[in-house]
Image (cartoon, rainbow, N blue to C red):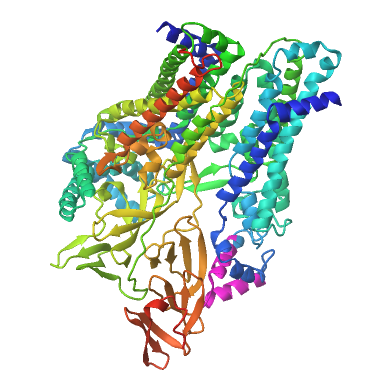
Amino acid sequence: MRLTGFELKKLFLRAPILVALAVFTVFDLARISASVDAGSWLHRDETWNRVYWELYEKYGGDIETEKINDLLDIYKPLETAVNDLTATTRLDVEGTLTGNLYSDKNLLERYFVAPMKRFSTYRGDASKTVDAAAENAVFYKNLGNAFEARKNAAIARIYSGRRITEFYYTEGYRLYLDYDFSTVLIFLLLLYALSQSFARDRECRMTELLLTSPGGGAATVIARIWAATAYIFAVSLWFSAVDFAGFDIFSNLTDAGGLPVYAAETMREASVNMTLLEYSALSALTRALGFWALGMVFLALGLAGRHALLPFALGAGVFLACTLAGARWGYSSNPLLKVLNPYCALVNRLLYGRTEFLNVLGAPILTWQAGLVLTALTGAAAGGLAVTLSGKNKLGRGSKT
Amino acid sequence: MTLWRFEVRKMFKMNRGGLIAALFIIAELALLILGDTPVDAGAALFREEYLAALSEVEGPWTPEKAALLESRARDAEGLSEGFDVLYKQYLYVNEGREDRYFLDANGWAGLLADRGPDIPLAAAIILLSVPVYCGEAGGMKPLALTSCEGKRLFCRHKLLLALAAASGLSLSADLVRLVFFALKYGLPHGRFPVQSVELFGSSGKGLSLLGAEALAAGLRLLGAVELCMLTLLAAAVCGQFALSAFLATAAVLLPWIGLERQARYSLPLPSSLLAAVGFIRGSEFETDAMTGESAALFREVSTGELALIAAGAALICAMCVLMIRARYTTALSRRPGAGRRAAALCLALALGLALDGCAEKAMPTAGGTVYNSRDERLHEYNGLTVSVRDSEIVVTDASGVTSPLVRDALKGVNGELCRANFFASGRYVYYWREDSEGGGRDLASHTGRTYITSLVRADLDTFTQDVVFEEVIQYTLLGIDLPAGGALNSPGDGDFFVDENYIYILGPETCRVELSTGRPDVLRIPSNHNVAFDGRSIYYIDPEGVLSAFDTKTGETSALYSGPVSDFRLTEEGLSITTRTGTTVNLPLRAEDAGGQAGKM
């Protein structure tokens, strides 16, 4: 434990890292603010913003027939007028919400009618899926296709009882779930700190010294792995917290936090049943796990080369390769290509946001389950490699170290 | 001169600079060879016909050329795909008659494509520059600075050498690209205006194609020098390998990923300069589908602004030089080095894990194929009948019960679209599926984006559905949308058939796509009459009215029937031919010459 503390202090609690962490946090917040401004009409138009939140007071909360009818009473005449092009294009029309009929119609359609429709039809879509899956399960069972039968039974289980009964502002989640910039920031911080961990020892001639001391050798490396794990999770979760806080401040995440995860536009096909708030936490932890696996690879690569440049370059290369492969095969219908890549844990909406199965010896395994296991295995293998390779040092050969 | 030699040796031998430079050239070449798809896929696919049609109108727009193209387009019969490509180009040229010229633009469009910053170049520059000031192992720096020659020349030599290396890398990358595109597509008419290439259609800069490339190369050179200087400064100030590399990487990556497009090209950043082409492109507007408002996506960087940005970059370089020199007249720091160790195994493991499983699924040979493009889609197998009903592919079993073929329970929630057309052979039925994701990132793309088009094979014995071919339309890389540049889009509801190695898509001409690579090519097979396929040969009526067979294995074409043929149909027994005179002739195809080599009359 003391060794871990030393390693943590020596490698990670250093001025350049702390400064970079602070600066990157500011970058992250600036980027979040910019992406909210670019991605939301409410942030582009002051009138829309004011009118939206006024109407939201009225229509937010439980989805009720009264509210829907009330909304459609305002919306339908507008839609008709706009569609047959009889609406006036004047910008200061009395009795309108935003001063212009087209603008009114667009605001209502985008921010109320369309999402409400999406929410209220989801129940039907999901139950159709359940019915179809249940029917398929029987069909495939009769055909003797065991995997498809079990897969469809699993789909029926996942989608049964899905419904969205409340209406809240979900645009914040649309932007938040699609946000990747902090992933790059975390990557840079991890690569910098981890790629030099062994090189620094070598530079100050600690390597030889460590191997002659009782706490040196493998014990030090294991302590270093623990310290690195603490650092990786701290940095990764820190940026996840900053992301969440940033989007909550600049947009709004708390209102819709209690909605089910499939209420988000891109998560309709989610394979997990939980609230958006819980999903945010799960996603943050998954990203931390993905970075842990990559971090262990960076740590093991730190053993290469005479100074820290080669490990740094190799680490950057690994990340680039993972990212390109992840982007290339992220949507592929061959889920194996996705889950073998630790990138799937970093940008994990492609894992949780889709209901995909792997055929593992006839058992249907969801991609997120396989992805988590394989990512953890990658990290463990890389960590083990770091211990093995560093233990076999010039002086350590044959000895216990 | 000796000092120079030492520095050169240090950079290229001791610090593996030579290896880095070689790897860099290989990476640039590999990216081009593996990643390049023609910007205008049609012009590349129907190249001969396109060039033939183009040769009449090459050059600037004139009323005569417009009249010629219009009149050609009006008698629509018998127009080649090549002409279609040219006509599309004409529509583009017509929008800006002064500065848009007709030319085979694929080479230039590829050369001047907006690829974003040149990542291999940035990586090579960082790797070469970091050790320049960090790499003086064993306390050489104080020693060198106290020697007579060292005091004067130590810093200067290193600086000049690093600059020369960075410029050399940048220029050699340009040369590699130039040669690649000149050889692959040709780079004709360098003096035509840059607006002739669609990417620069709205550009307000009066550049020629050659001028645009020269400007882009110059900007990249400036970016390379700036990045080199910033890296050297980081190395000189902090003296640590990891920290210098980290700062330099952050300086390239973060502004590029973090800033909106407009902001990227408003600042003298190395990443933007390395991307170069964005500075030359014109303004772009986008009409919001819902409000009808036109919003500027990107405002062109004017020549004046570009000059300011270049001056800013030069100023940054100059300041870096001054600061590096200041470091090297005073401070004393040391960088002892230690032993080396390789862990390349980890990299191999990680890459292996990430890229494993790329192997294509083998496709069993389809037996007993009888396909006629003019027939109604109907397939019988083992008591099951596959047909299209209400835009859905359905299976009817012997007892008359109809059920959908596509048994994906999730289609209600994931918005996938299955085309109502299929090709069947024995137990396998093939159909096209399009997957999209709702809720785009941009405000304008509120409709779902299609991400992937797949050819799915359903097995009538087990009803298992396997994807045998897929093509990504667009993918996202850390928040940046990249077009995947697939040459093929699914045939929509059009006709197609499949064998073990290829998909054949019937259009005005038949296009063939290799399943394993996705590479398309064109078969000279018109599909205005029936086209039949028996699993090995394609039967069709050529433009002269001769019934011909194309052997897909050998690539040979042979005539099957001497007289003019108005129609034919492939059956289990052979070909049933209707001649121009209205008589029906049966032409048996023996099993062994189903290849179509024999059977000539």
Which x, y percent locates residue B210? 72, 51
- Classify residue A52 as left or right of residue B236: left
- Relative to B534, is A371 above or below? above
Question: Can you say which quadrant of the picture contains the N terminus of chain A?
Answer: top left
Q: Nearer the viewer, residue A15 or A204?
A: A204
Task: Judge whether residue B236 is colored magenta.
Answer: no
- Classify residue A255 as left or right of residue B12: left
- Relative to A66, is B107 above or below? below
Count the numbered circles shown.
Answer: 0
Determine the residue positioned at 35% across, 41% down. Answer: A107
- Classify residue B73 as left or right of residue A113: right
- Relative to B441, is B360 above or below? below
Which x, y percent locates residue B472? 44, 50
Q: Nearer the viewer, residue A286 or B255?
A: A286
- Relative to B315, is B292 above or below? below
Which x, y percent locates residue A3? 44, 8
Q: What residue range appears in magenta?
A: B64-92
